[in-house]
Amino acid sequence: MDKKALFEDISKNILMCRKCALGSSRKNAVPGEGSVDAEIMFIGEGPGREEDLQGRPFVGAAGKFLDELLCDIGYTREEVFIGNIIKCRPPNNRVPMPWEIEVCIPYLYAQIAIIEPKIICTLGNTPLNALVSSKLTIGTVHGTLLEKDGFKFSPMYHPAAVLYHGELKGTLKKDFLKLKELLNAEQK
Ligand code: URA
């Protein structure tokens, strides 16, 4: 099977998934979207209200801001991959429970294995803690380059947190510019 077919297979499994209770409370699962050849994957926490309604990642206010940040560094949504640690919306947008992450994260690992990105950009604490280390916090490691299990990670503040704390906007924009430099320096 080619990469696209493998990816679509995972998406189909996500859309039918009932491994945890979120499978019953969601309207739509949100597998994630973008290019299977993406150099960079952006990973958020989990779908919010708008994402749950549309079945697409980062389509609300935070998503519009993410589009703007991508545009600043010369990318479109279609050229990268955008997804989440968990694929179904937690009620009232609460932080995902550890067991929800545990049953859902294999889908993301499978997506990462297919895409083989140069850099995985984690947005906020939840993906940083789930993918890199539970001991790190975004306030101390944002804008750096971390490595784990042969993958490179660039942690960023979550765009929704920055919309809420406007004083972080300049920091996030700077971290995106750094990300572009890191990508330029990487060889796939
Ligand atoms: N916030 C997230 O973490 N993910 C989305 O898809 C939307 C908002």
Image: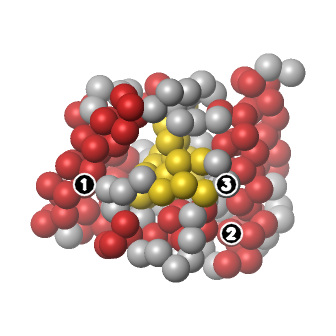
Q: Quadrant of residue 33 in the image?
A: top right
Q: Earlier in the sequence, mark 3 or mark 1?
A: 3
Give residue 18's quadrant in the image.
bottom right
Amino acid type at circle 2 is Ile
Residue 4 lies in what quarter of the image? top right
Q: Of label 2 and label 3, which has the lower sequence position?
A: 2
Residue 76 makes an appearance in the image: yes
Q: Name which residue lies at 64% across and 48% down.
A: 150
Q: Residue at x 42, y 45 (%)?
A: 59
Spot occupied by residue 70 in the image (x, y as percentages of width and height): 32, 36
Position of the C terminus by quadrant:
top right
User: Mark 3 belongs to which amino acid?
Assistant: Asp
Q: Position of residue 112 (x, y in %)?
A: 67, 43
Counting from the top left corner in percent of width and height, residue 24 is at: 75, 66
Q: Does the residue labelled 1 lie within 8 Å of ligand 1?
A: no
Query: Can you say whether 26 is above or below 56 in the image?
Result: below
Vertical relation: 130 (above or below) 179: below
- Where does label 2 land, which residue? 101
Left or right of 123? Residue 163 is left
Element carrying mark 3: loop
